[in-house]
Image (cartoon, rainbow, N blue to C red):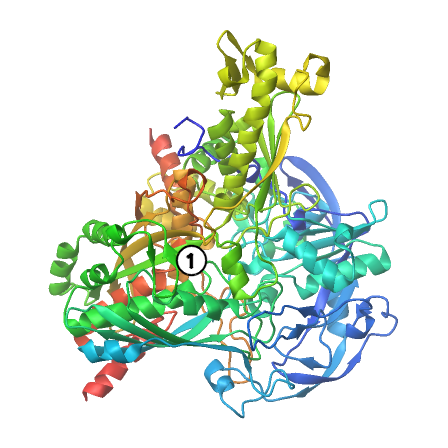
Amino acid sequence: MSDTGIGASVPRKEDRRFLAGRGNYVADIAAANEMALAFVRSPVAHGRIRSIRKPDGAENRVFTADDLDGVEPMRAPSKLPGYKPSDFPALAIGKVRFVGETVVACVGATRAEAEDLAQAVEVDYEELDPAVDMLEARRPGAPLVHDSWGDNIALATRTDGDMESVKARAAHSVTREFRMSRQAMVPMEGRAVLAEWNSRMDQLIVHTATQVPHLIRAGLAMFLGLEQRQVRVIAPDVGGGFGLKTYVQPEELVACWYAMKFGRPARWISDRREHLIADANCREHHYIVTAHADEEGRILGLEGEVTVDAGAYSIYPFTNCLEAAMAGGNLPGPYAIEAYGVKTWTVVTNKPPLVPYRGVARPGVAFAMEMLVDAVARTVGREPHEVRMINMVPASAMPYTNIARKTFDSGDHPGAVARAAQMIDIAAVRERQARDEPDGRLIGLGFGSYVEQAAHGTSVFASWGVQMVPGYEQAGAKLTPDGGLELRVGVQSHGQGMETTLAQVASEILGIDPENVSVIHGDTGLTPYSTGTYASRSIVMAGGAVSRACEVLVERMRTIGAHLLQCEPDQIRVAGGRVMGPGGDLPFSEIGRVWYINPEELPADVDTDGVEAVVGYRPEPDHGTFSYSTHAAVVAVDPDTGAVEVLDYVVVEDCGTMVNPMVVSGQVYGGAAQGIGTALFEESPFDESGQPLASTFADYHLPGAAEVPAFRLAHMVTPSPHTEHGIKGMGEGSTIPTPAVIGNAVNDALKRYGAEVNETPISPRRVLAAIAAAEGEAA
Amino acid sequence: MTEISLTINGEPVTASVEPRTSLADFVRDSQRLTGTHLGCEHGVCGACTLEIDGEPMRSCITYAVSCDGASITTIEGFDDDDVMEDLRQAFTENHGLQCGYCTPGMLVTARDIVRRLPDADEKRVRLELSGNLCRCTGYVGIVRAILAVLEKRRG
């Protein structure tokens, strides 16, 4: 390991500008003559638009769907059989389907002026009965979100397992119901777009806060009726994404349309209320799960019914059925189960669309599965970590293809449980638990484990039926005339530190100092095509591609270097930022000088592609990497108030080779804190009329520094056998088990009452309700 | 429109502002000091925190007109400040930032903690950070960075 290559905790290059207050986010960019957009949004969850009255004299500043000539509604179909597509219009056409839906667009010289105008627009609605709760919306006779569908089910799937044979051998059948509530993702920077038409380039230039610039380009071109060459999408600094910034937004389309129609730049910067009520939400899963287990707690068979509340519309490009598809494929988790059957329903309701949030379906899956494992443990009277270990795929069985046909590449899952159990010190916790706390609180211990498929490849995405299937990831590597390096990647770094970690990968191959490497990303005009940053894929895919591209540069520099050093190419070594031969060595700047400035010194047989290469990469097999982890927590629950405090939290994780352990740890901490939010605080509730009840940070509670524990973390390292450098994807992982870990710890604390919580967030009200329900049953 | 005169990062500024314009919008849009970030515009997330007359304040819920005669320091104005220099170094060493959006407000609050509470322990630091939300780091690196600067300054 070099000081700056793979495995080094190199401080991040991007930090300097952020610490100085010189980051450059969309809202920081000013365009001459720009206009600001504000939207009139639906105040009702479900209704028909009877009439819209624009303020007098404002016809050129106030726009409805009728004005948006050439703008198509967004359609995100799935190839899965039986799927019902839904058109998501940039401005509502005829009907509104959730509170916050864009109905009228207003422009002004400032956002304040645009909002003044929006206040003066009058819209008359005929209110319709809304479909609010997904289980009610699933039933026949529910109000229809899309009139032509006949029901509210976008997609239903069913996989049958051979359950009869395992039931015959099972001593216990344990059934539980779980619900993970609807949430918002809340990156600290909201969504933002600045669109302008550039006549010289014949191109719409769109600065937008996105994780997936090339996909946004494809979507904008399709829905605006442009050729893709006519759209350039630039994601500058992006203040967090977490999945929110992966879809084409109605407001984005309107800003682009205005810029094209009126020849003036248009900006829309969302405010926090717009994020909380009108952006795509996330999570909202319901589960009924049954484990058929033997006397030891070994789970022989697993049955599940999964319902996902997908909101009103399918979002482009990932659709609204990805969540349910992933839930169905991931419920068995890291366990070796003989029989598995699952039914899933993707249900539409009069709520904002659903977009996958960090962890994609798996936090809900783990909340159901991991809490079911603990229910099994309580049923058979064993420690939950022991029940996990006997059910997990052992290291000796790797590689292992599980009941859901996922092939785990490597790793020691029971070993991670054992290490977490040791770190949390079970004996000490049980001893403390047996004593009564002086303050009357109850101590609980919880575990949660998962396996995280990441960097899913072509075959996996093709099986999900989505439009945009990732293929070979490309990276460009270019030696500059003075011996520096430019890397070009189509992914986008918005907190993951890729300006540093991709430079480290280059440093590993070339020995170049990351300080002399520029990572150019997030711009369709400057980078090779990529489906972007999601699914914990970027360091696996772009990292692998950078590695391969740098290897090509090594070969090219060898030929030139051998000529200059008067030796054979196979005598040349490239290391430490220098080209070294038996009799002397040269800095990269000499290679750059000869290629660019003094080509008369090049050898006759030089590769004419020079010192720049774009190289494609895909791991084989392409089914993705499988990181895994076990978390454990100790909580104190106040049975009088229902308050939960996290006293201790440990994480043992294995994501293969770590490019930058500091960055890996940071991803783990951040994901786990978001998981604490899901577990204890965050919820986007709606009343029975479909009105959102959390529209500010006073109603929508995010975890702060005082609510998040000081996580303790240990790494295990099992390199992937299939990827460059053995890297596995890991950015999302630690959000996955956290709600279950806290839920299991709370239920462990409440076991003296026989009470169980089964819904996030585990608020004081829900804890007290669980205790009251158990006491009611006992009485 | 109301005319105000104030000092921003040591420079005198006179401007006409609408009474409804927030200090955050004023420094960002009129003064082009875009290091002050807007995360909620209702005074909870702390991304817009800057200094008014030496005290950390939320610029999103402060009207520009109320700052007539005040001295404002934004994140761009701390380049010669030794506490801020230590904090910036500690934030990068401890991975106290990821996307960078909360960072300017977090640094202004952190500087206030370091100056006001030289003996603060981890629990106190976490409590003092209640007014600044970070969505990326889980606060681990931020808390470590502030504790490292406190420790260094205690010598």
**Figure disc tally:** 1
In this image, A77 relative to A372: left or right? right
Seen from the viewer's position, the closer of residues A756 and B106 is: A756
Asked if residue B61 is positioned above or below residue A286 in the image, the reply reads above
Residue found at the far top of this picture: A583
Instruction: Tell me if residue A267 can be seen.
Output: yes
Q: Residue at x 83, y 49 (%)?
A: A202
Q: Which residue is mark 1?
A: A674
**In the visual, does A416 lie left or right of A74?**
left
Please provide percent x and percent y for residue A499.
Answer: 54, 38
Residue A181: x %, y % from top left:
44, 72
Furthest toward the right, the residue is A57
Which subunit holds the residue at mark 1? A
Q: Looking at the picture, tell me which residue is in the foreground, A76 or B129.
A: A76
Q: Evaluate whether residue B98 shows in this view.
A: no
Residue A628 placed where, x, y %? 34, 53
Task: Residue A565: name its quadrant.
Answer: top right
From the viewer's perspective, is B84 left or right of B24?
Answer: left
Quadrant housing residue A22: top right
| Percent position of residue A392, x then y | 26, 59
Quadrant (top left, top right, bottom left, bottom right) of the N terminus of chain A: top left
**Amino acid type, mark 1:** Gln
Q: Nearer the viewer, residue A35 or A487?
A: A487
Rate crowding at label 1 as few (under 14), some (14 to 19) or many (20 or more) other CA atoms within 10 Å: many
Q: Secondary structure at mark 1?
A: helix
